[in-house]
Image: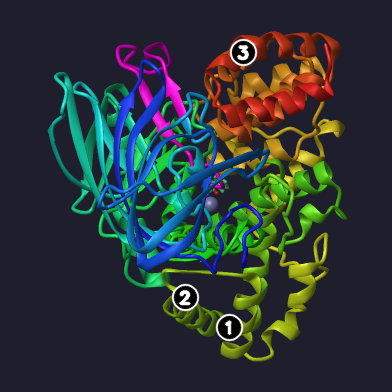
Amino acid sequence: MNRLDPHSYFDADQPRISRLRLAWNVHFDRRQLEGTVILELAAPSSGTLDLDTKGLTIRSVRTSRGTDIPFRLEDEEPILGRRLRLDLPSGTREVAIDYETAPEAVALQWLDPAQTEGKRHPYLFSQCQPIHARTMVPSQDSPRVRMSYRAELTVPEALAAVMSAGPAGVRPGGKPGTRTWLFEMPQPIPAYLLALAVGDLKSRDLSPRSRVWAELDTVGAAAWEFGEIETMITRAEGLFGPYEWDRYDMLVLPPSFPYGGMENPRMTFLTPTLLAGDRSLVDVVAHELAHSWTGNLVTNATMDHFWLNEGFTVWAERRILEALHGVDAAALGWAIGQKALEKEFERFGADSAVTKLRADLKGTDPDDVYSSIPYEKGARLVVVLERAAGRPRFDKFLRDYMGRFRFTSITTEEFRDFLEKSLPGVAKQVGLDAWLYDTGMPANAPVFHSMALEDLVSLASGWAMGTRPGPSQIAGWKPSEMLIYLQNLPREVDRASCDWLDRNLSLTGRGNYEILVEWLTIAAGSDYEPVFPRVREVLGRVGRMKYLRPLYTALGKHPRTRAHAHEIFDAAKEGYHSLSRRVAETVMEKYPR
Ligand code: BES
Ligand code: ZN
């Protein structure tokens, strides 16, 4: 036995899946995917094959000749799910599994028409990272295993389907009133990058290799917001080398999408809260795009090495930002990240094991420890390495790293060894092991300076003394500057202060959700009643976890707002994604009625 991933039954001594052939019927009425997956094995095999499943009903398991393969679905383990153990006859090349998903599959959110923009058709989307692919398909759900795939999705004929794959046509479905959408993903990807969405979707072309999908009412705004995508792709290629995935398409999801973005290959998934109307939140797109290299080409071997995915990607995101808008703009990005990092250290404690880059998550649900730490601490480690090596050498190192590990999944230790070989001495110089294996922030953490930043921080720190920004100053702020100003204000202020802020900065009506939620967090935490309708509206509609946590936490502080929080949560929870519901629930547990 050779189990290398604490979150999977994948056993490296067993046969490996190299390709999936999926055929799914999408049943909105019973909220189930039902159909067949054919697992193609890397080589003819025999004996035990363990697969990850969670909530799946297995109807049959057969060889390509149609002979039954003996199988056993073991008891449910709370985090991992149920191991599906097959006993393959000798010479098995393919395994066909007939099965269906559970209506409560964590990877899938099924939306009623009322939860969509068009209000006429239902909607379905998936979110498989970190370990939810097993609720959608039986497979080796460890990022150590890469699979290419093809898929046939049969859906109601009024709807369109997209996947993390190349589109390969549409044909009439087997049953009247249905159509089958075909997809082909030639590059091997880990199971967590499997993705699908089905809804009343429209698309707009943005460049020869990029288009954006969304519901009709949103697609125009989305096309404008992300209209500069081709420049971003070109910048990213300048950093990392050619874009390897053919197309870069994007899908703007309904507001219940629990993340800001998800780097599903060829089809980045995005929250509609990015549609600020001024392109001010496209750093999230830069981030998901950068994952096309850091994450999707070179992948973390397990969630213990998640920082390799996210730390490098945040660093890359800010390099793209720097290339597009200059060093000062990038410094503001780093400052915003610094705030996020400090908040996490407060939440977990600076000596918590969660603050280590190299994690040890055996027995821990990765969703329970998700935080900005692997992102922001990880990105700061990359900066320290970049500064120690010098940018030209570091950029060369990165390209070598991509070249060496492309289409593989690696551990922190493999990264460390490669770094030592390529840039000898740099690891020692920066104290790499302390960065990787110790809690808290090392003393040599990089500092980012910019005039704008320092001015904003000192302006905000004078709040209690009565210092206020003037109208022309406010008018000159970029959205990121407004955000930094708000982030540096006290968490609780009096009513007159709230009045002043809302009147002078026009906050409650903002379309930029970063600014809006920062403001609503201050206002809710200050028991400032005029914002309650807006808080209720946001929490009732938006499921992005990044926003739920601070808002519910702020509402928990005062008895009156706490009562509101429970009321809002009771009304909203049905519409939340199960992951979002869990986050809100965890916060509310700290603030009982
Ligand atoms: N891959 C992540 C999202 C994710 C991580 C989902 C772990 C499930 C488990 C994605 O690339 C991401 O980092 N999204 C961020 C964007 C931000 C850092 C720019 C988000 O959603 O906030
Ligand atoms: Zn990411």
Residue 85 picture location, percent across and down: 52, 50
Judge whether 511 appears above or below 373 on screen. above
- Residue that badge 1 annotates: 418
Q: Nearer the viewer, residue 271 or 220?
A: 271
Q: Residues within 10 Å of mark 3 (few under 14, many from 20)?
A: some
Give the magenta range: 109-132
**Residue type pointed to by label 2:** Phe
Q: Are marks 1 and 2 in contact (CB under 8 Å)?
A: yes
Residue 572 picture location, percent across and down: 59, 14
Tell whether circle 3 marks a residue whose Cβ is less than 8 angstroms from ligand 1: no
Q: Nearer the viewer, residue 57 or 377?
A: 57
> Would you say residue 123 sits in the magenta stretch?
yes
Q: Quadrant of residue 566?
A: top right
Most distant residue in the left direction: 172
The residue lying at 75 percent from left, 67 percent from top is 445
The residue lying at 45 percent from left, 48 percent from top is 70
Query: Quick check: 259 left or right of 365?
Result: left
- Residue that badge 2 annotates: 405
